[in-house]
Image: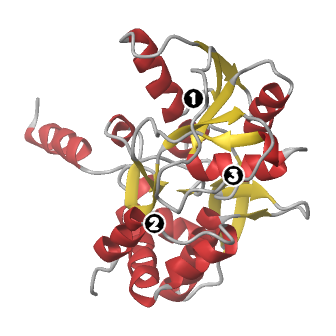
Amino acid sequence: MSRLAAALLAAALITPSLAAADALREAAERGTLRLGVRADAAPFSAADGAGGYAGYAVDLCRAVVERAARATGRPITAQFVAIDAGNRFAALAEGRIDLLCEATSRTLSRLDHADFTLPTFVTGPGLMVRLAPGAVRLPPLGGKGVGAPEQAPRRIGVLAGTTAERLLRERVARGELAAQIIEAATHQDGLAALTAGLTDAYAADLEILVSLRGQAADPAALAIADRVLGLETYALAVRPGARELRVLADRVIAEAARSGELVRIAARHFPGREPGEAFLALMLFNALPE
């Protein structure tokens, strides 16, 4: 192999793809930053009924779009691209979206497919069960659930392709949980199966369960169990190697933590709930100086 060929091969091995490295420049040239959003992941990312999307993660991504426009000196607007739990990382890897803006848990295995920003939220998968009607106190942000079911659920619904599904199946495999896992195509399908009695419980991250409970015809008949399956942190995600865009998003998140904007965004999307200790700790860790 010639010296020139060897040098080119070495450069290819250590240099991020041009498309990933230039994600911010390409957004400026297009005039849009493509945001991967979900219709069924309220209160983090959901269709707003007017052709757009709203939610805690969507608000953070809108702030990233505004910062990108200021940083590049070019007009950049948000372009929403609908994705789901099953195709979101493929859409990112294939360059169909620039920023993943929904209920995305940051895990070690996912680092092979995406680069993640600073954490944006902390939560954990829990169970929602049918109970007799009565008052149910909601958990704090980043806290544990409340109200335990009288009997262990035999049939548990869960959205396919999520960390909640993985944790459930791991517990079943270890013999810690004796239940049938029933996959749902959307969270709304999972809620419908639970209220119709086709499942005994539905598993999802706590904040999503709270939102789903509010959508039920009889919220008082549903409660969120008092144990979480694990603790997870959410983050926004970019294509591997898109460092400029990730660092810009990190600056937005850090500034929102320093200024208290994260709390104000949470108040918009989690009304009536106080931040828990884990959420406040996340703000402190995120408040990086410039």
Q: Which residue is mark 3?
A: 136
Q: Nearer the viewer, residue 222 or 94?
A: 222
Camera-nearest label, 3 or 1: 3
Is residue 59 positioned above or below 147 on the image? below
Q: Residue drawn at (45%, 78%), measured in percent from left and top?
A: 252
Q: Is residue 219 left or right of residue 114?
A: right
Amino acid at the residue labelled 2: Gly
Residue 247 visible somewhere in the drawing: no
Question: What is the number of the mark on residue 276?
Answer: 2
Seen as rendered, the residue at the extreme left is 3
Q: Secondary structure at mark 1?
A: loop
Residue 230 horizontal/vertical position (percent): 40, 39
Q: Nearer the viewer, residue 201 or 152?
A: 152
Is residue 61 positioned above or below 37 on the image? below
| Pointers 3 and 1 in contact (C-beta within 8 Å) | no
Q: Nearer the viewer, residue 90 or 228?
A: 228
Question: What is the number of the mark on residue 161?
Answer: 1
Amino acid at the residue labelled 3: Val
Residue 199 visible somewhere in the drawing: yes
Q: Is residue 134 left or right of residue 241?
A: right
Mark 1 surroundings: few (<14), some (14-19) or many (≥20) residues within 10 A: some
Q: Secondary structure at mark 3?
A: loop
Camera-nearest label, 3 or 2: 3
Compute the Cα span from label 3 to label 1: 29 Å
Q: Nearer the viewer, residue 233 or 106?
A: 233
Q: Residue drawn at (53%, 48%), measured in percent from left and top?
A: 145
Q: Earlier in the sequence, mark 2 or mark 1?
A: 1
Residue 5 horizontal/vertical position (percent): 17, 38
Q: Secondary structure at mark 2?
A: loop
Amino acid at the residue labelled 1: Gly
Compute the Cα span from label 3 to label 2: 18 Å
Camera-nearest label, 2 or 1: 2
